[in-house]
Amino acid sequence: MTSLLVNQLFTSTPSQQTERILWIDPMGRGLFGIDVESATALPVFHEMNDVQALVDQRMLSIREDDPWLAPVSEAGIPNDHKVKRDTAWVLIEPLVKNQPGIFIPSSRGRAIRVIIAAKGVTNQTVYRLLRRYWQRGMTPNALLPDYRNCGAPGKDRAISNRRKLKLASNGHGSILIDADVRRLFQTVITGRFATNKELDLSGAYEDLIRLHYSESVINEETGRQMLVPHAYIPSLRQFRYWYGKDNDALQIERIRRTPRVYDKDCRPLLSSSTSETVGPGSRYQIDATIGDVYLVSRLDRNKIVGRPIVYIVIDVFSRMIVGVYIGFEGPSWIGAMMALANAASEKVPYCRQFGLEIVSAHPGPSIS
């Protein structure tokens, strides 16, 4: 006899169904299983002799994989999902622990009626939760909401002409977005928004309404022409949604900023300088900046002598400053060489020049 265990999946060739074992009779008379793919499945009793016959004829196989029992990290579950799971578990816990009575239709019906009377829930809710618990591995996490399955990933919804369009309080109503409307969106995005970096999405939307969803009428009071939007127009929310769905936002931004500016300031960084180093001292980086301070003459405090140029050399691996130089000459090779010379000098005598006493972390022969 093939070893069968509770919570195992088995597939029967005659029925082409995959069932989960819910309970095995300790006396060996049979087991209860449930079809894991049926939306209306309920526990079914199988005589052990029938199961053994299918095994002998190689018409029953044990599934090693269990796609309905995926591991879930507790830390990754949203709090509102946890609340729904825990509420559902409190509701059905007394039922699922009543084995094997819960698998027998008559006793299951009586137990569910008691829960309905006590909790004020519907019969459909209890059966839906029980079915989900049994089909998905008999763990409390099987009761987590299926929001991830809402919609069809990568597919657009079919447009229904039966949808009723209503006017909002501002006198305008939204429209159904079909292929023609999306082409108008694309025309405005590529022709106006992508080529004008001063224009934001709201401005592009206003251009869309002005160019494609407005009529020019004469104002009876002033005699001037004015644009009046149609009663039903795309909403700004619809425009933003289809902008993100039909366009590569990063490519649009690259066009708006110009490729040179985008690649310099906005392109994604695929690596870092630190990842290219093997240890302290393997790579230094140097930078110069103009100090945000004005220095005065030592001889006459009333005379400003200029702003200093500060050169800093850092060790890429440790992020520690290894060299410094401050001078008045503009950023140049000469100033950089002075900073590099300081990076290679002993820091104890260097700091002593300015009245600072430091101790070398690794005493050794001086190199200065």
Image (cartoon, rainbow, N blue to C red):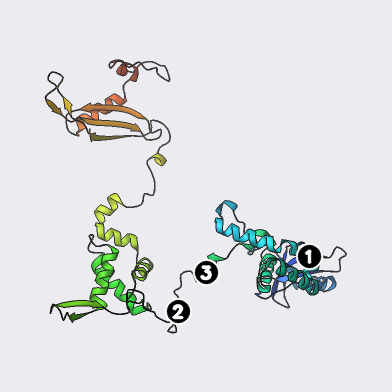
Rendering coords of residue 55 (x, y %): 79, 70
Q: Quadrant of residue 181?
A: bottom left
Residue 65 appears in the rendering: no
Q: Earlier in the sequence, mark 1 or mark 2?
A: 1
Q: Is residue 128 left or right of residue 77?
A: right
Q: Secondary structure at mark 2?
A: loop
Residue type of the residue flagged with mark 1: Trp
Q: How many marks?
A: 3
The residue tagged 3 is 150
The residue tagged 2 is 158
The residue tagged 1 is 23
Q: CA distance from mark 3 to mark 1?
A: 32 Å
Residue type of the residue flagged with mark 2: Ala
Residue type of the residue flagged with mark 3: Cys
Give the crowd class for mark 3: few <14, some 14-19, many >=20 residues within 10 Å: few
- Quadrant holding the N terminus: bottom right
